[in-house]
Image (spheres, rainbow, N blue to C red):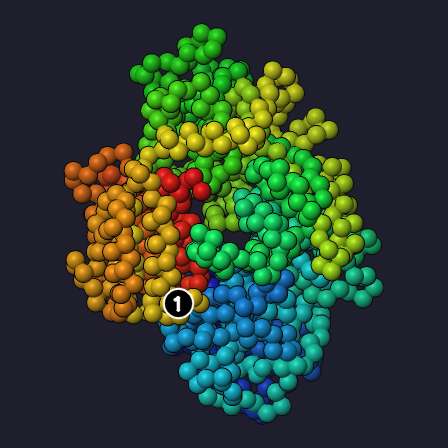
């Protein structure tokens, strides 16, 4: 699970301090869990008897202890059981209970992000659950099989690897890996009929039938919302209490799984408690109130870095389009990269579209547009330019620029000297001149402008997003490389950027990822002043305003004033145009009403919606006055470029211009020394679609070796207690060698995974290997670890990650492995981020694809693809 779900999972304790089930935070103070979990915690009864149905009302007012083991250790929090709305309602399913924290919320805890199953392809999708079998935190990985009636959905893990859903998982949130949202709550395991005794089925209540607040936005990803305070809704399904005791028979009189759910009315007191909620990915809502006509459904795909911005925009459009309290449009907003959407459009979003192994990219034979999200009606590609081929597709109706944002240099306010720098902030320094001033020290030769003015260096240092991932960085490179010769490009531009990136632990990532690291440093009072960062003006406004920076960034809050960013505007700086693309599909999959609603949305964006875009920090046409986000307090010049017509936005989105900048970047970038460590413990024999987990890992190695550049080096290890020493190090770090690589792959394919997992020792040994004295300088060093379990064979060893030269740690966590697993005093995710790397949780059947994507980013030749 990514950050939000990890920060929200709680264990529910009984009076003896034993964890009897799970719960999860749905707003700042409320948690959801199962009634039978609360009963077990308060009374010690593991499940209701056939003659005694679950009675939530009898438990109301009781207090239980909850702990958040994935976030912090220490004293538990106290939660009180809230009463049901109508305890005498015969249709009440009886196994959903809401808890309210009565002690202060522990530091670092945050509500989950919620999705609606089925709306983005949840069926047959990989899901993950963190529960407490035997009172101990353990992961389950399986698939959502499909609905079973009564609004319930079945889950299964048809393998003998890892844990099965069993007592202790009740009340746990179900995380859909692809759409990155919680899609339901575990409620029961099938104790009566099992397809196979070893692989029991389990059941979840989908989010749309759980009592989540109807004001759970923005961002709004809704399908049935009509009123701000609509009724809550729950659904009936299989018997409620079976997870507390294995083998317990179903209670007599249990409602059928096909029973029809009816709405529940929400007490006014509960409404007041739920008005202030934290924004999440998705919003789910119940059936419309009587009298509200059906609303149009509009599906919106947005660039990942812009997801939170356009969720806010979508929420505003929904509010503005309401008629007499009824919603007239429901927006489903989801993130998808421009590459994914473009590929889906070229395949007409066909459910059977994929790439065969003969295409030359065997790592992606199972790609389907449905894995990206539903067929969009509207697309916001963000900073990514649209090529002519894409614009001419039949599915692209039209596109229009609705906002733009200049690219700027964001400098921490504490580094800015008004007397020294104000002139350069508002005068016409080019990008190379401004970069030279920021990256050079006062003892270096000054930069001489085109007009002959010497500009001394100030030593701010500069970081930039990765041009292989960030369209904003590609645009800046067009301007940054201007008038810089090929021989000077590496020394004057790329080397200073790399040094700062390594020294401060910045990731090789998107603009949102870089700003996330900037926020981490800005919020750490013990850290030195952060460097300047290349960013868009709009992203700078969000950074200073304390808003979330992309889906994967957990850090929130405004920086201290002296660490907030001040925008410096180079002359002729490139600008990011934000376009809205309207898409056309056959009538069978896109109704005329959806097309008409997309037209209304486009007109709103060009009219009243401009004020919302300005609030989000964009520049918009026809609005000369500054927006509420464009203020000097937020670090920008509100009247730019209105009072400075000599400042122009250069068009850096031309394909030929970008291709030239990309080629020059590949020539100037440093090569990489990468050590790949593959988990070869016994659990890697688990099936993963097209083979075992280890088979897919070897496929990924085979594809990745083809991306190795002339100057790059790679080594491959396997690690388990069954392959110690030289037996687990089949390829030392070195340059490409076709004969040796063929022998490596043959050896890996003969390897039979077995033994335990010395994960921490492997990380420690890998860092030592990449830091061996005498190794050449000037390389990007990275250790890539693929594992499907937590450490079981390293004892108390804590890997040493700090040291010189810097090494980045990348972890691909599969199956039972989690980025939340601890490395002494911090999570694996935090440990990887501290090195400038990252931990990614990946589905088992995509191991080869994720390895290929990572090496395409790290290696020289991969950047060409």
Give the image location of residue 463, x and y in percent. 41, 32
Of the pair 27 and 105, the residue shown nearer to us: 27
- Residue depicted at 33% across the width and 24% down the height: 491
Q: Residues within 10 Å of mark 1 (few under 14, many from 20)?
A: some
The residue to which callout 1 is attached is 691
- Residue depicted at 68% across the width and 67% down the height: 232
Residue lying farthest top? Answer: 452
- Residue depicted at 26% across the width and 46% down the height: 737
Image quadrant containing the C terminus = top left
Q: Is residue 601 left or right of residue 490?
A: right
- Relative to 344, say whether 668 is above or below: above
Give the image location of residue 532, x and y in percent. 43, 29
Would you say residue 561 is visible in this rendering?
A: no
Give the image location of residue 8, x and y in percent. 48, 61
- Residue depicted at 57% across the width and 58% down the height: 353
Give the image location of residue 855, x and y in percent. 37, 47
Of the pair 764 and 673, the residue shown nearer to us: 673
């Amino acid at each position: 699970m990514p950050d939000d779900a990890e920060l929200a999972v709680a264990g529910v304790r009984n009076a003896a301090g034993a964890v009897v089930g799970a719960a999860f935070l749905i707003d700042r103070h409320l948690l959801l869990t199962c009634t039978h979990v609360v009963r077990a915690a308060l009374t010690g009864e593991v499940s209701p008897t056939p003659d005694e149905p679950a009675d939530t009302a009898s438990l109301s007012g009781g207090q239980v202890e909850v702990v958040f083991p994935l976030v912090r250790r220490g004293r538990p929090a106290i939660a009180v059981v809230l009463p049901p709305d109508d305890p005498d309602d015969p249709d009440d399913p009886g196994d959903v209970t809401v808890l309210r924290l009565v002690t202060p919320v522990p530091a670092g805890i945050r509500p989950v992000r919620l999705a609606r199953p089925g709306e983005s392809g949840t069926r047959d999708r990989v899901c993950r659950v963190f529960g407490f079998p035997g009172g101990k935190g353990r992961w389950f990985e399986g698939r959502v099989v499909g609905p079973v009636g009564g609004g319930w959905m079945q889950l299964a893990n048809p393998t003998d690897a890892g844990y099965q859903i069993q007592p202790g998982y009740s009340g746990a949130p179900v995380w859909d890996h692809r759409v990155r949202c919680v899609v339901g709550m575990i409620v029961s395991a099938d104790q009566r009929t099992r397809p196979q005794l070893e692989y029991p089925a389990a059941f979840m209540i989908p989010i749309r039938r759980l009592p989540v607040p109807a004001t759970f936005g923005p961002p709004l990803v809704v399908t049935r919302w009509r009123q701000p305070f609509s009724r809550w809704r729950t659904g009936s399904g299989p018997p409620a209490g079976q997870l507390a005791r294995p083998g317990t028979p179903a209670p007599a009189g249990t409602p059928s799984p096909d029973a029809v759910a009816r709405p529940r009315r929400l007490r006014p007191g509960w409404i007041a408690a739920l008005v202030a909620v934290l924004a999440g990915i998705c919003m789910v809502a119940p059936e419309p109130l009587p009298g509200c006509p059906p609303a149009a459904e509009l599906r919106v795909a947005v660039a990942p870095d812009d997801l939170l911005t356009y969720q806010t925009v979508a929420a505003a459009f929904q509010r503005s389009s309401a008629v007499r309290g009824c919603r007239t449009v429901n927006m489903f907003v989801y993130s998808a990269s421009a590459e994914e959407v473009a590929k889906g459009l070229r395949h007409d979003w066909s459910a059977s579209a994929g790439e065969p192994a003969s295409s030359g990219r065997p790592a992606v034979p199972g790609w389907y547009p449905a894995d990206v999200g539903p067929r969009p009606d509207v697309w916001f590609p963000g900073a990514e330019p649209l090529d002519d081929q894409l614009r001419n597709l039949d599915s692209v109706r039209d596109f229009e620029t609705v906002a733009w944002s200049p690219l700027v240099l964001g400098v921490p306010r504490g580094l800015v000297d008004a007397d020294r720098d104000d002139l350069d902030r508002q005068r016409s320094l080019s990008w190379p001149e401004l970069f030279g001033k920021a990256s050079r020290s006062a003892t270096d030769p000054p930069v001489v402008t085109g007009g002959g003015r010497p500009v001394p260096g100030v030593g701010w240092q500069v970081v930039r997003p990765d041009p292989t991932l960030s369209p904003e960085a590609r645009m800046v490179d067009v301007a940054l490389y201007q008038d810089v010769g090929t021989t000077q490009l590496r020394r004057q531009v790329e080397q200073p950027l790399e040094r700062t990136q390594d020294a401060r632990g910045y990731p090789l990532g998107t603009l949102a990822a870089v700003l996330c690291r900037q926020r981490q440093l800005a919020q750490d009072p013990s850290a030195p002043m952060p460097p300047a960062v290349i960013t868009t003006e709009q992203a700078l406004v969000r950074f200073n305003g304390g808003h979330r920076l992309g889906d994967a960034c957990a850090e929130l809050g405004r920086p201290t004033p002296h660490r907030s960013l001040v925008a410096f505007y180079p002359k002729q700086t490139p600008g990011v145009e934000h376009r809205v693309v309207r898409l056309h599909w056959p009538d069978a999959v896109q109704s005329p009403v959806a097309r008409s609603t997309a037209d209304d949305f486009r007109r709103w964006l060009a009219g009243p919606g401009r004020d919302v875009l300005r609030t989000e920090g964009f520049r918009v046409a026809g609005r000369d006055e500054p927006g509420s986000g464009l203020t000097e307090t937020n670090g920008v010049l509100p009247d730019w470029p209105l009072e400075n017509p000599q400042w122009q936005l250069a068009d850096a989105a031309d394909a030929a211009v970008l291709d030239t900048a990309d080629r020059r970047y590949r020539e100037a970038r440093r090569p990489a020394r990468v050590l790949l460590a593959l988990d070869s413990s016994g659990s890697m024999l688990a099936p993963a679609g097209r083979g075992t987990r280890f088979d897919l890992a070897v496929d990924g190695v085979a594809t990745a070796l083809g991306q190795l550049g002339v100057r790059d080096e790679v080594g491959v290890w396997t690690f388990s207690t069954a392959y110690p020493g030289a037996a687990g190090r089949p390829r030392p770090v070195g340059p490409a060698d076709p004969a040796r690589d063929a022998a490596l792959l043959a050896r890996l394919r003969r390897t039979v995974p077995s033994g335990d997992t010395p994960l921490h020792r492997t990380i420690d040994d890998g860092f030592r290997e990449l830091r061996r004295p005498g190794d050449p300088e000037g390389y990007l060093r990275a250790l890539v670890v693929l594992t499907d379990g937590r450490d079981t064979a390293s004892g108390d060893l804590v890997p040493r990650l700090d040291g010189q030269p810097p090494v980045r740690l990348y972890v691909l966590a599969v199956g039972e492995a989690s980025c939340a697993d601890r490395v002494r005093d911090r999570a694996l995710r935090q440990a990887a981020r501290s090195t400038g790397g990252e931990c990614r949780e990946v589905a088992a059947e995509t191991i080869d694809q994720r390895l290929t994507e990572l090496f395409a980013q790290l290696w020289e030749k991969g950047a060409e693809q």
